[in-house]
Amino acid sequence: AQSVTQLGSHVSVSEGALVLLRCNYSSSVPPYLFWYVQYPNQGLQLLLKYTSAATLVKGINGFEAEFKKSETSFHLTKPSAHMSDAAEYFCAVIMDSNYQLIWGAGTKLIIKP
Amino acid sequence: GAVVSQHPSRVICKSGTSVKIECRSLDFQATTMFWYRQFPKQSLMLMATSNEGSKATYEQGVEKDKFLINHASLTLSTLTVTSAHPEDSSFYICSALSTSGVDNEQFFGPGTRLTVL
């Protein structure tokens, strides 16, 4: 079955430090890949998406992600964490033509002062 | 552009009553909308796929008679939770896929918090 794995349900970094949130997917065909952010009691906001163009994708709020086909990964990074980055982050994939998103379990990003 | 609204944002109801949640695409047409349910500290669970003018497709384990979905127009889908019970309390989120299907991106509503007493 197709799946998306986010390594680490919680990631804690210091303010100003590098943020790395991991996402791996299982697929034999090129997927569409997305990262979403969710603040408490709110809906989801798209951070960035990969759609078979450039493998390094830049998103909002200084985030970027790199699609690595050989590793079936789409890890999310940000060079310098800010307190406002504290939220839940979800990786999601569309792997076939029914447009359904397959979701990772989410990673809660905690920013330490 | 690509704004999706949900109404209401919060609703509290008594057990046994029905609640309707609306999902609207405000500035684009959506042939397909999705309804998700999210439990605290968990990821989104797809409940059903709603296609304009046809019956919704429900995921396994989702009761279609309890969660009624209607997608009557290209900008509106509704989810009705019938005879709601406390276990139906959850955060319900809809998303919409534009008719142009740009990059297969779904646009999400802000969610509806349902509390059943």
Image: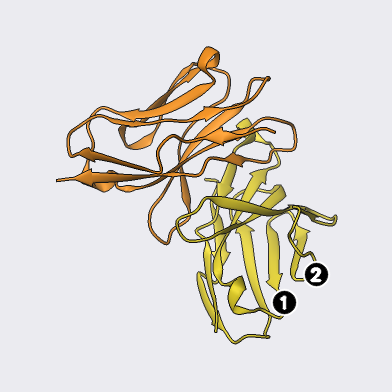
Chain colours: A orange, B yellow
On the rendered structure, is A7 left or right of B27? left
Q: Position of residue B98 (x, y in %)?
A: 66, 43
Q: Residue at x 57, y 46 (%)?
A: B107
Please tell me which residue lies in front, B9 or B1.
B9
Q: Residue at x 69, y 66 (%)?
A: B79
Q: Chain of mark 2?
A: B
Q: Residue extending furthest right?
A: B54
Q: Residue at x 51, y 16 (%)?
A: A71
Do callouts 2 and 1 point to residues on the same chain?
Answer: yes
On the rendered structure, is B18 left or right of B13? right
Q: Residue extending furthest top?
A: A70
Task: Tell me which corner region of the image, top left, top right, bottom left or bottom right, holds residue A70.
Answer: top right
Q: Residue extending furthest left?
A: A113
Q: Position of residue B28 (x, y in %)?
A: 63, 48
Q: Position of residue B32 (x, y in %)?
A: 72, 48
Mark earlier in primary sequence (2, 1):
2
Examine the rendered structure and indicate whether residue A111 appears above or below residue A43.
above
Which residue in the structure is indicated by mark 2? B65
On the rendered structure, is A54 left or right of B33? left
Q: Residues within 10 Å of mark 1 (few under 14, many from 20)?
A: some
Residue B82, numbered circle? 1
What's the amino acid at mark 1? Thr
Contact between marks 2 and 1 (CB within 8 A): the answer is yes
